[in-house]
Amino acid sequence: MRLRQLAISQSVIFFAPPEVHQSILNTRKQNRQGPIDSHDVVNWLLEQTCCNIEQLQPLYVSQGLEYCRRRVAAQRYEEAEYDAEESRAYLKVLEQPERYSLEELYAPDRKIKALPIQSNGNAEITEYVKRLNDLKASIRDTVDTVQALAHQEVEQEREVAIEVETVREVKKPHSAVASPQPLLHRDVKSFAETGRLVAGSHTCIQAFVALGKTAVGRRLGISDSATRSGLYITQDFSSTVVPDYSGLPRDEYSRPVHWVLWSVSANTALIVSDYEANALIPLIRDTFPPVTHLITYAAPITKSMLIFDNLDFFAIPHLPPNWRAPAWLVRDLGIFAGRTYLDYDRQHLAVCEALGLPLPIPITADLDREMPFSDHDHEDKPAEPFSPSPLLFMQEWLA
């Protein structure tokens, strides 16, 4: 970007980590506590460029002397292409040792010494060598350090080359044909307007029944108690690609859970696709009193995402001020969406029961008063894990 309209219709904002910010203040030397402007940033960049050039001067000298040495060898062994003796002598000049020992690089009395260059009357090479020797004399480091830095630079390049060869292989999913996008189904629309599921509807599928049709669900199974949960998904949410000839489930194309349609009267939640959520917003936005609420959700895969676990981050229309998501809904939604973090104070009992884990502490009357569970939540909680092998199920489902 050339920024020809800078300060007219274009502007630049600089972002820097704390260490760079402190380095800019140190470069300014005066008024180190004041604000930083573009002049300070440009001045710091020029200063860093000059410092890098000065640090690489020993390498430039070493490369220049090596160039002169090869030019002289090419003139001295002009018949190297035809004479075997001259060819071996010429290659001996071109070849450099593959590695140096630590003693050769750093020992005070055994550092690598550069051989003098005999220009053989070549005025151009003589001038180059003289200028390089003058530059080398002006550098604070000694000649031995120049050669050592050059060899260190070569070793670093080799290490970087090895790192580049390590390429992470990513397994890509098999190609598939996307399912056609249907219009908003009348059963989903009816649930949004009335808050009740249509009896016998094939559009709204119980979430754990759908989970049992996945490859993991077919192999490990789903318990009957989990299929009585009030969490459902739409047919459009579950259909992402056209099934192939094998008829096997394509778990790699499962949608992430982003929108949940909640009915307060029926205590039922319906997971919808992004397309369905976009079509439902005009239907329920201005409904008064609201029958259903479209809630945004994201499975907490990091600790900072636990704010979505309460299901009150954003909803259309707004949720009642004193509304709290049922414990069974947060638990089942987290299992289906692949949650990796949970609110321990509110969810550890429900999650332990769903996964078949022993309770970390005994349930007492005091604990019941502290836990924000209602009697309805206790009645809906399954008495058995959601799967015969819940831990193995979650391990493979999350992977």
Image (tube, rainbow, N blue to C red):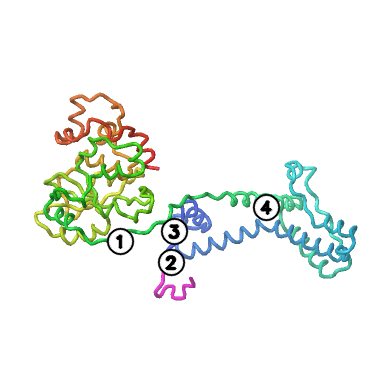
Mark 3 or mark 4, which has the lower sequence index?
A: 3
Q: Circle 3: is it few (<14), some (14-19), or many (20+) Cα within 10 Å?
A: few
- Residue 191 at what x, y percent from top left? 15, 53
- Closer to the eye: label 3 or 4: 4
- Closer to the eye: label 2 or 4: 4
Q: How many marks?
A: 4
Q: Nearer the viewer, residue 70 or 241?
A: 241
Write down the quadrant of residue 213 in the picture: top left
Q: What residue does disc 1 label?
A: 180
Measure the alpha-carbon separation of dots 2 and 4: 35 Å
Magenta stretch in the rendered image: 1-12
Please name the amino acid that badge 4 sits on.
Glu
Q: What residue does disc 3 label?
A: 15
Q: Nearer the viewer, residue 349 or 110?
A: 349
Mark 1 or mark 2, which has the lower sequence index?
A: 2
Measure the alpha-carbon separation of dots 2 and 3: 10 Å
Q: Residue at x 75, y 58 (%)?
A: 136
- Closer to the eye: label 1 or 2: 1
Write down the quadrant of residue 137 in the picture: bottom right
Mark 1 or mark 4, which has the lower sequence index?
A: 4
Measure the alpha-carbon separation of dots 3 and 4: 30 Å
Q: Circle 4: is it few (<14), some (14-19), or many (20+) Cα within 10 Å?
A: some
Q: Residue at x 44, y 58 (%)?
A: 15
Write down the quadrant of residue 83 in the picture: bottom right
- Residue 335 at what x, y percent from top left? 30, 41
Q: What residue does disc 4 label?
A: 153
